[in-house]
Amino acid sequence: MLKNGRRFFLRLCLAVLAWFGQGLAHAQFDKTPWPRTQATPAIDMVDLHGHRWTSAGLKGRVVVLNFWATWCGPCKEEMPSLQALHKDPNQGPSDASPAVVIGINVKEMPSTVRRFLAAQHLDLPVVLDPQGDLTRQWGVRIYPTTVLIGPDGRARWRVVGDLDWNGPIARAWLKELQALPATPKSGSK
């Protein structure tokens, strides 16, 4: 009888752990505000398509700046949703759209990145960061990390971990950012 009780208890514990584990699997990101005392680094970079991205050129648009690597499992998991966000006519990178997605690949060979993008059918803008300079500049230590920049050019949030960028959480954040004025209020940093 005691052995059956132990088995039942063990099964109950395993079931509870599995149930909690499912909840944790869906909460794989952490969103924190960009530190008010930390300046937003200037953007001046060229993607694999030869397009130059600058802070001035992105003014008035929400920017989704995603730091990733091909060897990073969570990065690969969120790439399809970033691609879909990039292709969304209401969110995509056209000159008239309110948001743009830019991937920043960290410390990998161009050929590796191009092969990965082709194999995954991804055409979102990707900038190479071969020495990790951009990564350090933006304070990124974990992949994936996404920095959300408001239309005023200020970094607003840092999201660490993978996220469904087409899900209701991310869409609400983007909508909130799109509602911000393109010029900062006087006296704000």
Image (tube, rainbow, N blue to C red):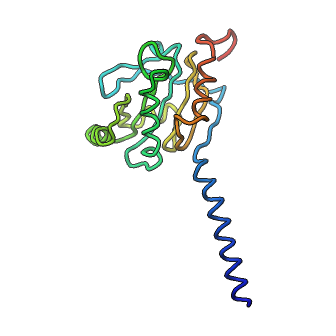
Q: Picture coordinates of residue 147 (x, y %)? A: 54, 31
Q: How many marks?
A: 0
Drawn side of residue 156 relative to residue 58, left or right: right
Q: Residue at x 45, y 26 (%)?
A: 88
Quadrant of the snapshot with the C terminus: top right
Name above or below for residue 169 compared with residue 3: above
Name above or below for residue 136 compared with residue 149: below
Asked which quadrant contains residue 124, the reply is top left
Name above or below for residue 77 compared with residue 179: below
Viewer-proximal residue, 54 or 139? Answer: 54
Viewer-proximal residue, 154 or 6? Answer: 6
Q: Residue at x 58, y 53 (%)?
A: 25
Q: Residue at x 44, y 32 (%)?
A: 84
Q: Picture coordinates of residue 107 (x, y %)? A: 37, 41
Residue furthest to the bottom in view is 1
Q: Picture coordinates of residue 8 (x, y %)? A: 69, 79
Name above or below for residue 99 compared with residue 7: above
Q: Picture coordinates of residue 111 (x, y %)? A: 25, 40
Quadrant of the snapshot with the N terminus: bottom right
